[in-house]
Image: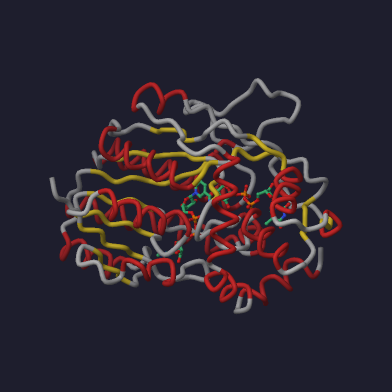
Amino acid sequence: MSMTIIVTGGAGFIGGNFVHYLLKKYPDYRIVCVDCLTYAGNMETLAPVMQNSNFRFVKVDITDRENIFKLFEEEHPNMVVNFAAESHVDRSIENPGVFLNTNIMGTQTLLDACRKFGIDRYHQVSTDEVYGDLPLDRPDLFFTETTSLHTSSPYSASKAGADLLVQAYNRTFKVPTTISRCSNNYGPYHFPEKLIPLMIANALNDKPLPVYGEGINVRDWLYVEDHCAAIDLILHKGLVGEVYNVGGHNEMRNIDIVKLILKHLDKPESLITYVKDRAGHDMRYAIDPTKIHNELGWLPATKFADGIQKTIQWYLDNRGWWEHIVNGEYQNYYTKMYGKK
Ligand code: NAD
Ligand code: TDX
């Protein structure tokens, strides 16, 4: 069956990977990417698909009600997948307002458009951070879909607010929604302000690798393509009104990731620099993916050892993509954020 899918935030890391994934897997689907191109949006990520006749890029802010409604009127989408968000915890500590506006009000605008024009599915791409964190000394604890929301940063609070709104629109207005809550992603096109791409870029440039606190915080890493496959399954087989946790049981300490990257690149550990910890820093994230495995048959395909190797190779092969970023406006952010640490 042919269909039109609006993918918001498709010029960003996961949304960009998802656009590539969909166009490859469903050559007859029409994919309409909506992105306002904040600092995190990059048209170079979409360059390989811009000439595809089934692909359309529209530069619109998801909070821009008039133009979002106009687009729905033009495209009559069957589905919307909302990746568009302010996504970096550190930036949310510096400037919470834009997070609330994009992540909550932008979600409301999209939901209102779905309500007005009708939709088969609205999918909200959420995060494990809505559950808060787990203690390091309780490795038996995991986040399930029924774990209560307990946020730490303005970023996670804004994502939790959006999730609640999605569930309210499902119950009150019968908008057919689903939500996925995924753990930390890594892979190609990852903006080099996040841990893995930042450490790769700095190591390649022989710059210090800034590790927050003692580097013992734990994240549960998933290769981005596995996240794309999970969302694809939820869209096609998931049940309306449901929440699905997505994660691959791959918990690692930050310091171990950083050391692994240095080893792969044959760079010295003396590049590691411990810096002031993130305010409110979550200790450990760990997803229990039993529900999506049992109900939809999802399992991650990429082992971390292979995924990190592929990711490092991608950054070596695509220096232009990230060098444009680290040499551009991002420099000002980097000096501001790490100059005082
Ligand atoms: P990203 O920051 O790389 O990309 C976000 C994209 O959204 C950018 O292209 C940006 O231009 C666009 N955008 C931002 N504000 C917008 C607005 N107002 N209107 C239109 N477009 C706008 O983010 P990402 O890492 O790809 O994350 C995508 C989604 O997945 C987010 O919702 C995030 O909360 C969620 N998520 C991310 C991770 C992760 O590890 N990166 C894990 C779980 C969930
Ligand atoms: O310079 C750094 N040094 C460092 O030690 C940076 C940027 C990060 N860190 C630490 C903080 C975290 O413990 O590494 C860990 C990962 O940090 P980020 O890459 O900023 O990711 P995180 O805060 O875990 O959030 C990510 O995963 C969940 C995404 O950015 C979110 O969008 C997603 O919801």
Q: Nearer the viewer, residue 99 or 135?
A: 135
| The C terminus - image quarter | bottom right
Up the image or down, 159 lies above or below 35; here it is above
Q: Quadrant of residue 304?
A: top right
Relative placement, left or right, of 239 versus 97 is left
Q: Residue furthest left?
A: 1
- Residue 262 x, y percent position in the rendering: 74, 54
Q: Position of residue 121 (x, y in %)?
A: 25, 43
- Comparing 174 with 33, the one in front is 33
Q: Residue at x 40, y 45 (%)?
A: 228
Up the image or down, 154 lies above or below 175; here it is below
Height in image: 239 above or below 58?
Answer: above
Q: Quadrant of residue 249?
A: top right
Above/below status of 108 relative to 65: above
Please name the residue shown 50% across and 57% down the image.
Answer: 188
Q: Give the residue displayed 63% in from the left and 23% down from the top.
A: 141
* In the image: residue 176, left or right of residue 311: left
Residue 144 screen position, x and y as percent? 51, 26
Query: Furthest-right residue in view?
Result: 270
Residue located 54% across and 59% down the image: 314
Find the residue positioned furthest to the front. Answer: 266
Q: Find residue 130 and report its horizontal and vertical position in percent.
A: 54, 40
Inspect this view and state whether residue 335 appears.
yes
* Screen quadrant of the N terminus: top left
Number of numbered discs: 0
- Between 219 and 146, the one lying in front of the other is 219
225 with respect to 154 (left or right): left
